[in-house]
Amino acid sequence: MLNTATAAVAAPPVTAAKRLMLSVNNIEVVYNDVILVLRGLSLEVPEGEIVALLGANGAGKSTTLKAISGLLKTEDGEVTRGDITFNGERINGIDPDQIVRKGIFQVMEGRRIIADMTCLENLRLGAYTRRDNGVKDDLDMVFSYFPRLKERTGLAGYLSGGEQQMLAIGRAMMARPKLILMDEPSMGLSPLMVKEVFSIVQQINRDLGVTILLVEQNARMALQAATRGYIMENGKVVLDGTAEELRNNEDVKEFYLGGGNEERKSFKNLKSFKRRKRWI
Amino acid sequence: MTLFLQLLVNGVIVGALYGVVAMSFVLIYKASRIVNFAQGEFLLIGAWTCWWLLTSWHLPFWIGFPITLVFMLVFGVILQVVVLRPMIGEPIISVIMVTIGLSIVFQAAMKWMFGVFAKPFPPIFASPTTNLFGLEVQTVYVVSLGISILIMAGFGWFFKYSRTGLAMRATAFDQQVAQSLGISVRRMFAMSWAISAMVSAVAGVTVGVVNGVSSALSIFGIKVFPAVILGGLDSVIGAVLGGLIVGVLENVAQYVDSQWLNWGNMYEIAPFYVLIAILMIKPYGLFGTKDIERV
Ligand SMILES: Nc1ncnc2c1ncn2[C@@H]1O[C@H](COP(=O)(O)OP(=O)(O)OP(=O)(O)O)[C@@H](O)[C@H]1O
Ligand SMILES: [Mg+2]
């Protein structure tokens, strides 16, 4: 039923269909040497899938993504325990620019496009690590996904929020990564734009075969797009399963998908909640 | 009137050189937010290196000059890696003190190695002066103007179209984002120092060919301040214009002084008066962006 592939870390399964791409194993993350944010978090991302990572504000979702992409280093954070394995290789402690070269690309929370450059320059920077000559074709491909970006020739800082999100996703596509870590792509967008963003996320997953680890506040949309999901609270995973299981889970319904009374503030208070220890 | 025109042309030519040095100063500031007080010494080191290659090794200019440029590239990288990289994360004031220290050390080292007297370059151009629109101008100045324009165009191209140039701009904009794109920020820092040292050396050699090489060359490092502050610390175009303004101002002030005021050497610091006046009206410089404090 639930994803129980933790045992597979020692010997990655060879079955092509469900090959593990990323496995985060019981990591602990500390900021500034004192602030403990992740307390034994584990998750797994099979190749070719969209995996959703959900949780309340401050649960540590962005921290998890930064631990994987190595960007934690730029914020004085450190993985102090556990390990992160990408395609069988341990990657914790590696510099973020090297991790991009291994094929992991993070689309950070809040778009973070380079405001004083044009769309085209932003996109070309996405392909910074590439040396092949397919960059020009990929520019055309990105523009075919986002025709609006082609019309905007001014500075990216003047784009609308939705357009900036498109640019941020397009920039990630330009890197031709194997895995995209996407942090709240729907943040601050209108419902219509949210739909568009999610359909594009699914499209690039399908068309380009990119694996996606998707952090979201919009649980409903995320669990529709994803094949499986993790729910985290206070720096730990408290529930996981296929997207369908999570969608039908009473607690998730109540807590994330709306409905139910407002009293319950945490999964800890839920009777039916079965805490799964992922310590090995 | 001819004198005035002559001074104006001189102003533009020298101003273009100021602009080049100011650009290389801004390059370091933009990439790493370091105010480099040793910029003038880059001119000095470049000029002495070239002079040494030409006089001691009797290399022709067209061989000695490129070797100088390569040397300065390497020198810039080593300086950044050995001295400035360990300073990353230290307070800005400490880093500034380090660059001031570097400037003093380089000055002393150059005097120790090459003496305190100005030494002329061996003649490089067949005819020392050229006629430019009816004005007698030193050939090397005409060539220097050409080189300045070339460097400026090169900078423009580099930052607009080259992969590394874009990466440097990204680093200047937001280091975390740059890293998320796969850019090695450390490498960008080293490169900004390397390019800055090399470009300054071009200006140093040019001035050295005209006036001879002496520690007076590092005055350029001081003149750069009114230029970049006029233009805005983080604007490359502003640096060029600031340099031009300073160059012209100096020469116009000299003219005004010689015709009417006769105050003596006061014209030397004329740009600083204007600098203060402009900063009172536009605290971020003429082209600076207001969020200059962004980290
Ligand atoms: N650079 C940092 N230094 C210190 N503490 C940090 C840092 N970044 C995050 N934290 C802390 O870590 C905890 C988790 O933060 P994180 O950004 O990972 O949460 P999140 O799940 O992404 O929340 P949100 O949904 O609001 O984006 C928070 O309590 C936050 O204050
Ligand atoms: Mg977050």
Image (tube, coloured by chain):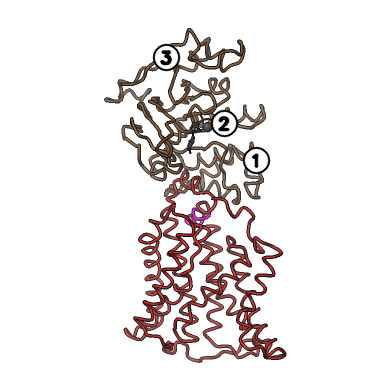
Chain colours: A brown, B red
Can you identify the residue that label 1 sits on? A148
Mark positioned earlier in the residue sequence (2 or 3): 2
SS for callout 1: helix
Give the labeled residue for mark 2.
Answer: A200
Q: Which residue is mark 3?
A: A275
Q: Amino acid at mark 2?
A: Ile
Numbered label attached to residue A178: none
Name above or below for residue B22 compared with residue A63.
Answer: below
- Establish whether ligand 2 lies closer than 8 Å to the Cβ of label 2: no
Q: Earlier in the sequence, mark 1 or mark 2?
A: 1
Q: Considering only order in the chain, which callout, 3 or 1, is on the residue closer to the N terminus?
A: 1
- Residue type, label 1: Arg
Q: Is residue A21 visible?
A: no
Residue drawn at the location 65% of the way across and 90% of the way down: B134
The span shown in magenta is B163-169
* Secondary structure of residue under mark 3: loop
- The chain letter under disc 3 is A
